[in-house]
Image (cartoon, rainbow, N blue to C red):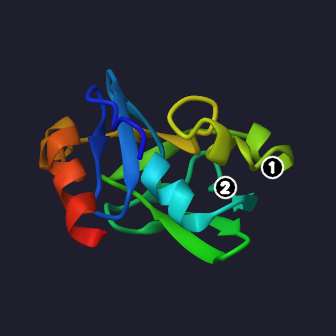
């Protein structure tokens, strides 16, 4: 398993979160993409859509099946990674950079504090394996 970036936060459903002011970038973790196998299609949310924490926001389809991607906190979609429509395998190749999925403008940044740290996420993965 690759190194879990310590500058990100994580969800129990294997999304990573990068905070930049009042906006967060969200993708799936390296662990999640390796469990999914080769990603063949990504259904992205629409910019302007409003989601509550825990709501299904996007879908990733792989050779093994379809997985929902969830909103880690309440927010409004302000950007999506359109490149994934033509090159969905970016999620496999570079899940923490080029494979990001969407960006949310967050209303309550304190909600980020409830997400897992890299150490907590690593401990969760160890339990799942």
Quarter occupied by residue 60: bottom right
Tell me if I can see residue 60 in this picture. yes
Q: Where is residue 114 in the image (x, y as percent from the top left)?
A: 13, 50
Q: Nearer the viewer, residue 90 or 42?
A: 90
Q: Is residue 18 left or right of residue 83?
A: left
The residue under label 2 is: 44
x then y, percent, for residue 20: 36, 22
Asked if the residue under mark 2 is in contact with the one under mark 1, i.e. CB atoms within 8 Å, the reply is: yes
| Residue at the (64%, 63%) spot, across then down | 37
| Nearer-N-terminus badge (1/2) | 2
Asked whether, in this view, residue 69 is left or right of residue 52, the answer is right
The x, y position of residue 43, in whole percent, is 70, 61
Badge 1: how crowded within 10 Å, few (<14), some, or many (20+)? Answer: few
The secondary structure type at the circle numbered 1 is helix
Q: How far apart are marks 1 and 2 (CA)?
A: 8 Å
Q: What element carries label 2?
A: loop
Q: Where is residue 119 in the image (x, y as percent from the top left)?
A: 16, 42
Vertical placement of 23 versus 38: above or below?
above
The residue at 23%/60% (across/down) is 126
> Which residue has dot 1 on it?
85
Q: In which quarter of the image is residue 100?
A: top right
Res. 115 in view? no
In the displayed structure, 60 sits above or below 49; it is below
Mark 2: few/some/many CA within 10 Å (<14, 14-19, 20+): some
Q: Residue 16 carries which label?
A: none
């Amino acid at each position: 398993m690759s190194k879990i970036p310590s500058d990100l936060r994580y969800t129990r459903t294997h999304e990573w979160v990068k905070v930049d002011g009042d906006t967060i970038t969200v993708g799936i973790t390296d662990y999640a993409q390796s469990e999914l196998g080769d990603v063949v299609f990504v259904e992205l949310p629409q910019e302007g859509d409003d989601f509550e924490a825990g709501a299904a926001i996007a879908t990733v389809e792989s050779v093994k099946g379809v997985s929902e991607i969830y909103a880690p906190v309440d927010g409004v979609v302000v950007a999506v990674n359109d490149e994934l429509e033509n090159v969905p395998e970016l999620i496999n190749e570079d899940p923490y950079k080029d494979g990001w999925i969407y960006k949310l403008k967050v209303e309550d940044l304190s909600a980020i504090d409830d997400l897992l740290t890299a150490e907590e996420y690593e401990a969760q993965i160890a339990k799942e394996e």
